[in-house]
Image: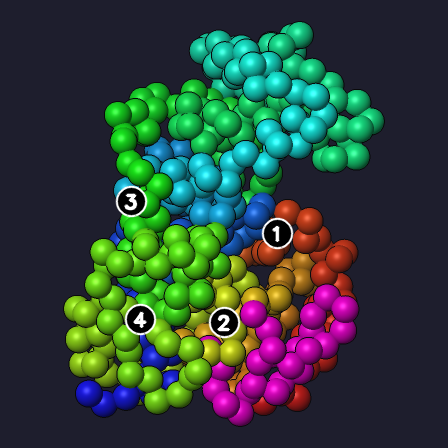
Amino acid sequence: MPSIGESKLRAWWSHRQGLDTSLNNESAREVLRRTGWARSVGGVGPYLTIFARNGDGREDVDRAAASLEIQELPSARGCTYVVPRDDFVVALLAGKEFGGAEMKTATKLGVKETEIDKLCCAVLQALESEPLEPGELRKAVGGAVRNLGEEGKKKGLTTTLPVALGMLQTRGEIRRVPTNGRLDQQRYRYALWRPNPLAGVNASSAEINTELARRFFQWIGPASISELRWFAGLGAKVCDEAIKPLKLVKVNLSSGSEERWMFAEDLEALNSFTEPKTPQYVLVSGLDGIAHLRRDVRSLLAPDDLNRRVFVEKGFSEVGKLRDLLSHGIFDRGRLIGLWVYDTATNSIAWNSFVKIDKGLETEVKRTEDYIREQLGDARSFSLDSPKSRVPHVKAIRASYGLIN
């Protein structure tokens, strides 16, 4: 069997991720089902993930969320992702193993499980009439919620309410609803989830781990076992057990020290896949699945780009040494060819390119720029990202425009 070269592998990942216009006519739900859950940290990642693949506007995505076609849930590693309806059960159960951190903190502060159980009942009763914000819930449940004082404040847990809300979410009893309907904000109301998506579900942890692994390799295979372990938050032994039923096959790669695996039928498709000859430019968020799922920026770079110095939080670093994209990314057939951030001072994208800039690349930058300016207003990477904190980043990227080419 011939080996797979780096360029073809990158183009394949781009194809599987739908960054080649192949998902243009698909819904937001189908995009997330086929290419992976969109990491949500109060930034524009979910919007850009979907826009880059099918061109949906913000209101289209918001309607999909409002109709429960997609939903932000605690899931893999206990982190929040925007998940398609098809995967609600797997996502919730995958996150269940990681949902007890706040209860452990509360226990150290003298809170007993019986107290939280009573608070959970009070929350559910309060939500019977309508969705409520946390402040409204505190008033509605009255004495059932307890202030944890200065000691709790030091540990990041001021009251017992977040403990109950977290438990009820992982059980599928309640869900978070953005107060203004937008996924790039972190103000929520809480609503009863009826019917509970976990009602009648009887799946073991091992079965859920296997289903999570199945999705991972469908989204981003070929991938390494260590990459799956990071994404799913699994130990080595548990991970080995999770992938056994999948019957993955090893991929013959022309380079790379780590073994990569995928499904046999996908390997057949990869071997017959033809790398596109013309550019397929696309701008994505720093948390886009093509980079986030495997956390291996190096494999997305051409050899000549590995040592390029790029802006990071406290100075500069060689881009080939990064695991995560610290800027938003520009890709062409799976190759990282540039970086970008949004500059609210000029309502424009600040960007650079590792390759010669042509009309097609400029057109794609403008398409994304128009989308952000007209529909999002900004392109925050995460909740604490702000126009002010981004100023050094904007300056560094603008200074490198025309120099990196």
Question: Split into 4 quadrants, where in the image is the N terminus?
Answer: bottom left
- Amino acid type, label 2: Asp
**Amino acid identity at mark 3:** Glu
Q: Is residue 267 above or below residue 177?
A: below
Dot placed on the residue nearer the N-terminal end, 4 or 1: 4
Q: CA distance from mark 4 to mark 2?
A: 15 Å
Instruction: Tell me the number on the disc at residue 382.
Output: 1
> x%, y% of residue 373?
57, 56
Question: What residue is at 65 percent from the left and 26 percent from the top?
Answer: 107
Q: Which label is found at residue 207?
A: 3
**Could you classify mark 3 by the number of other residues whose Cα lies within 10 Å: few (under 14), some (14-19), or many (20 or more)?**
some
Q: Residue at x 40, y 43 (%)?
A: 94
Q: What distance separates the C-alpha of mark 4 from that of mark 1?
A: 31 Å
Q: Nearer the viewer, residue 196 or 390?
A: 196
Q: Residue at x 61, y 67 (%)?
A: 327
For badge 4, the amino acid type reads Trp
Which region of the structure is painted magenta? Answer: 300-323
Instruction: Give the mark nearest the N terminus, 4 or 2.
Output: 4
Alpha carbons under labels 2 and 1: distance apart: 20 Å
Mark 4 vs mark 1: in front: 4
> Mark 2 or 1, which is nearer the eye?
2
Judging by the rendered image, the residue that carries numbered circle 2 is 296
Asked if the residue under mark 2 is in contact with the one under mark 3, i.e. CB atoms within 8 Å, the reply is no
The mark that comes first in sequence, 3 or 1, is 3
Q: Residues within 10 Å of mark 2 (few under 14, many from 20)?
A: some
